[in-house]
Image (spheres, rainbow, N blue to C red):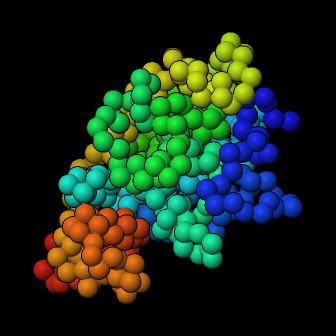
Amino acid sequence: MLAPFACHPDQSRGRLFDERLSSFRSAFQRDRDRIIHSSAFRRLKHKTQVFVEHEGDYYRTRLTHTIEVAQVARTLAGALGLNTDLAESIALAHDLGHTPFGHTGEDAMERLMAPYGGFDHNAQALRIVTQLERHYADFDGLNLTWETLEGIAKHNGPVRGPYADEKHAGPLPYALAEVNAAWDLELDTHASAEAQVAAIADDIAYSHHDLHDGLRSGLFDETDLMGLPVTGPAFAEVDRLYPGLEKMRRRHEALRRVFGLMVEDVIAVAQNRLAAAEPRSVHDIRHLGTTVIRFSKPLYQELKAVRSFLFTRLYRAPSVMVERARVSRVIDGLFPLFMADPSLLPAEWLADLDPKADEIGLARCVCDYVAGMTDRFALGEGERLLGGEFAATIG
């Protein structure tokens, strides 16, 4: 049974291109399945999360991260009476627009695309699902429902208007502007509760698994975590219940308690906020002027301390920074190379490039190609196209 403020598939605003309804799947279930079967989703297997994809078999990739986010999103949505299929669809699509090499690649692409309309991975995800996936006879993209597109665009909050985060100041990234011009996504309102669930599921998943990956990498150890809020009490509880527990079991038991604490906190806060707001429809959720799915203030502050620790000891660790600089040179080398000589693009990309395209049109084509690369393919193309001297700088 769905809550009245959930997104009901039979009340969906539909798809940009009309299609016959499925006899055995809801509209949001079809969205989920199309995302899973897309080429962009498969490529997430070889895109990095924090560590470059080839560095170890146990570190998270964008694909494993996405699967974990989807699992959390379904759990939260189910507990709150929301549409689990829509929450899962948005979660599965939320990282489709990421470049190779994670945030390092995104930083490079943002810099390179600044003169050509900008780059944002959420906007690029929309471009992928509305244009770049080309498998269907009747349309480009996946022809997802309005609600899923809205969730991809706004799962981190309004992009325009009084409730938008200041990071969204300035022109819209061109990829988002194009989609919004074709179909108004109401960028000045909050998204559905299902989209908000997908956003906080992302926070929960990476906060949990980055602790795991950081420990496995050896960049910090359990002793470091015992001095932090949230993680410290979790390890203390495990030591009390299971004195002398083997190291890997102790680590897992502690971090699954951290995971559970975050999930339980979000559910409790959401239940309280929903009870106070009494929304009667998804329209009410979008126009509350605030989110209903969030951490409690005490836990949020404690998680800020954990994330500050991760920023220093993991994301900006000296060895990680060396790798960031190394892989940045790949993007910085390939992008201008294709701009200077588009004939180096694959034949299918050249076929799609308008012969009359100006520099902006060419840059956006090159961006689509480079941003879609996996880590290993980008490294291979850098070595193949830029030669031995380039290979020596990244070896």
Q: Residue at x 33, y 69 (%)?
A: 365
Residue 147 in the figure: left or right of residue 207: right
**Would you place residue 225 above or below residue 12 in this image?**
above
In percent of width and height, residue 203 lies at 51, 38
Q: Residue at x 69, y 50 (%)?
A: 14
**Would you place residue 202 above or below residue 139 in this image?**
above
**Would you place residue 371 above or below residue 282 in this image?**
below
Q: Residue at x 40, y 49 (%)?
A: 177
Residue 167 in the figure: left or right of residue 43: left
Residue 369 in the figure: left or right of residue 78: left
Who is closer to the viewer here, 146 or 77? Answer: 146
Q: Quadrant of residue 322?
A: bottom left
Q: Quadrant of residue 195?
A: top right
In percent of width and height, residue 180 lies at 47, 47
In percent of width and height, residue 127 lies at 46, 59
- Image quadrant in which the N terminus is located: top right
Q: Is residue 260 visible?
A: no
In percent of width and height, residue 391 lies at 20, 78
Q: Quadrant of residue 344?
A: bottom left
Q: Residue furthest left?
A: 389
Q: Residue at x 35, y 52 (%)?
A: 174
- Image quadrant in which the C terminus is located: bottom left
Residue 362 in the figure: left or right of residue 66: left
Who is closer to the viewer here, 142 or 295? Answer: 142
Q: Is residue 211 visible?
A: yes
The image shows a total of numbered marks equal to 0
